[in-house]
Image (spheres, grey):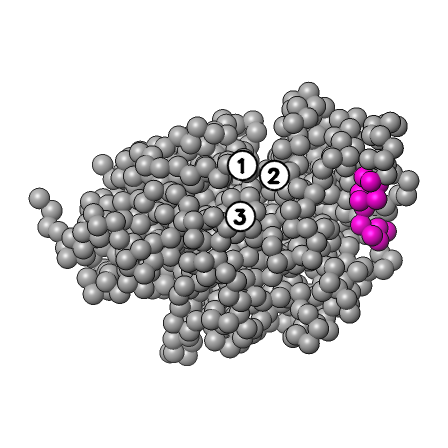
Amino acid sequence: MRKRTGWYVLAVLVAASGLRLSQDRIVGLAATAQVAKGGVPDWPTYGGGVAGQRYSGLTQINASNVKQLKVAWTFDAREEGGLQTNPLIVGRMLYGYTPSQKVIALDAATGKELWRFDPGSIGRQPTRGLSLWTDGKSSILFAGALTNLYALDPATGQPILTFGDGGKIDLRKGLTEGNPSNEFAALTSPGVIYKNMIMVGFRAPEAEPALHGDIRAFDVHTGELRWTFHTIPHPGEYGYETWPKDAWKVTGAANNWAGMVLDEKRGILFAPTGSAVNDFYGYDRIGDDLFANTLLALDANTGKRIWHFQAVHHDIWDRDFPSPPVLLTVHRDGKAVDAVAQTTKHGFVFLFERSTGKPLFPIVEMPFPASDVPGEKAAATQPLPTLPAPYARQMLTADILTTRTPEAHAWALEQFKTFRSAGQFVPFSVDKQTVVFPGFDGGAEWGGPAVDPTSGVIYINSNDLAWTGGLTENKPGGGVGSTLYQSQCSACHGADRKGSPGAFPSLVDMDKRLSDTAIAEVVHTGRGRMPAFPGVADARLEALLNYLKTGNDPAGSANTSSKREAESEAAPAVMAKYRFTGYRKFLDTDGYPAVDPPWGTLNAIDLNTGKYLWTIPLGEYPELSVKGIKDTGSENYGGPIVTAGGVVIISGTIYDRKIRAFDSRTGKLLWESVLPYAGNATPATYMIDGKQYVVIATSGARDPKGPQGAAYVAFALP
């Protein structure tokens, strides 16, 4: 019989008693029980810990034996849709979601379902994790579903009725002077627990109307608001002068959708923000627009700004920060420096001293072209770090167009001749496509990087595909349905409703696939990357449905009074002269990226020096592999974890549906296994009864041509 350590016995006793240890107590107890003998057994926080390192000190699974991993259990969610959850594992309990935002608890050793919380409404928004508060005696599990934040009993899944309004708070309240039920907010990434507070951001639409992107802290017991930080500053607040005078009243977003991390010792909350609306035409927000596209360091006790860094001034490219930063310690001149690292969609890592915001590698403000669009004024400069070098290509040129086949190359070359391609931060033009490379989906994406705290090495998975975008004039005279569609839907589904292959579905003939009721449900609750539009109702909804089905605004589609009402509400008070033409992924006629590989990579960078240790392609297309076209890399969503056992474990890839383990020192592939669906999530690892597991959430939503469903799959050594 294996000898039981004091830490193992303590964990069993805690699990049996139903107690939930705080992260501080877990770390402290693990330290006194010699972490090197097995590490912290749980995965109690999104990303593994409040520092966001996606690191585990467990060593049972290591570089020498990882090739022996086998499926230990599978939990079938019995639903279709997307699943991006990095689950929590505390004691013997695994907490996660289903694709429809039902919260589940599983036995983490067997995958058996223990309880399920149904919020009573079908939501298809991304749900990437949960939050757990504990004082060591009692615990609260926090879960987002649609617009609500729920407080649940971790043992039963039942709402804690003393929190907020019968166990939940509506995240939209307090963010608008109008009716919050007409607005959209969703807790895409989980909140951060600090003392007796949960600190949250939210997801917002990419176009008007959008709520103000305030970051807020709520009392974990009552749901009462404890503090608010205005990401669009009010008069008298720092940064107010970087916006037009009254922008704070009407402009929305600049929100934290990607999640946050916490320096518990210093009480500093690090929160990256996204862009302000409208994403691509900033005529009504001329200026740098603080604190959009900004890494904020806030006092976690009060919400006051300590320091900030804005990565994109006056963003007109949707270059929001895609993931939480990560805390680590690096070494400079023989001294340890506590740092925070932030990855970006455009392929850079920014590294700062944690307390002061001092850059640890020089950052240079580089000049970029002016906009030629009437009413727009692009920022004259943008900040770029001198180290590390970018982990994604920065400019599309003719010599890196696809050579997969002569026909594909010829087609790509003809398309390329019509584009404007001059590198980063080139403002969009009217009626001409501009290359965005890396594309709107990164570079780095929402899965976030992993860091080995013992070495200061960061592991980043990256997309390396080209997209294009542009502007076109809003023509007057459109009806209610077309006005709603062009202002709210066309950015993703195109002005012609045909979508963008591989990214956004076509809406042509959608009435042959979905009923009016089903379409209305998607409009009101959203799905995947599509936000919800709860304010589109009654006559406006009727007009939109007619337009979606026909591409026209037929006369008589609504009675006179309701038609007038719809027309009065269909458009903003001031219609922008230009709108975005839509997200367009640059794919060849066979649906493959129209640039040479790699189309996705995994990178290891030593943040002590800023030098790369290795870069490898990540992912493949199975049908190309059988033809001998291998190691192409592919789009990847979800991130890596790294362990003290010397392995980096990541899934992420869409089309091959594989989970892989690499040697953290060399990048050598050590193990891979095919999953039932794509693992577009970040794995977690934990130990129960002396056995280490690796678990990944899988789903088929990103590849409509592949198997459809969702499941959690856990691996362990035989």
**Drawn side of residue 505 relative to residue 71, left or right:** right
Where does the magenta region start and end? 565-577
Out of 441 and 291, give the one closest to the viewer. 291
Residue placed under numbered mark 1 in the picture: 121
- Quarter of the picture holding the C terminus: top left
Q: Amino acid at mark 2?
A: Thr
Asked whether residue 567 is drawn in magenta, I would say: yes
Q: Secondary structure at mark 3?
A: strand
Tag in front: 2 or 3: 3
Q: Amino acid at mark 1?
A: Ser
Q: Secondary structure at mark 2?
A: helix
First in sequence: mark 3 vs mark 1: 1
Residue placed under numbered mark 3 in the picture: 148
**Crowd tier of the residue under label 1, counting other residues whose Cα lies within 10 Å: few below 14, some 14–19, many 20 or above:** few
Confirm whether residue 608 shows in the render.
Answer: no
**Drawn side of residue 202 relative to residue 130, left or right:** right
First in sequence: mark 2 vs mark 3: 3
Q: Amino acid at mark 3?
A: Asn
| Label 2 close to label 1 by CB (< 8 Å) | yes
**Crowd tier of the residue under label 2, counting other residues whose Cα lies within 10 Å: few below 14, some 14–19, many 20 or above:** many
Residue ID at (38%, 78%): 335
Where does the image place residue 19, in percent across and percent down from the top left? 26, 53
Q: Among all residues in the image, which is located at the extreme right? A: 477
First in sequence: mark 2 vs mark 1: 1
Asked whether residue 626 is drawn in magenta, I would say: no
In the rendered view, would you say 487 is above or below 389?
above
- The residues tagged by marks 2 and 3 sit, at their Cα atoms, a distance apart of 12 Å
Q: Among all residues in the image, which is located at the extreme top? A: 512
Label for residue 525? 2
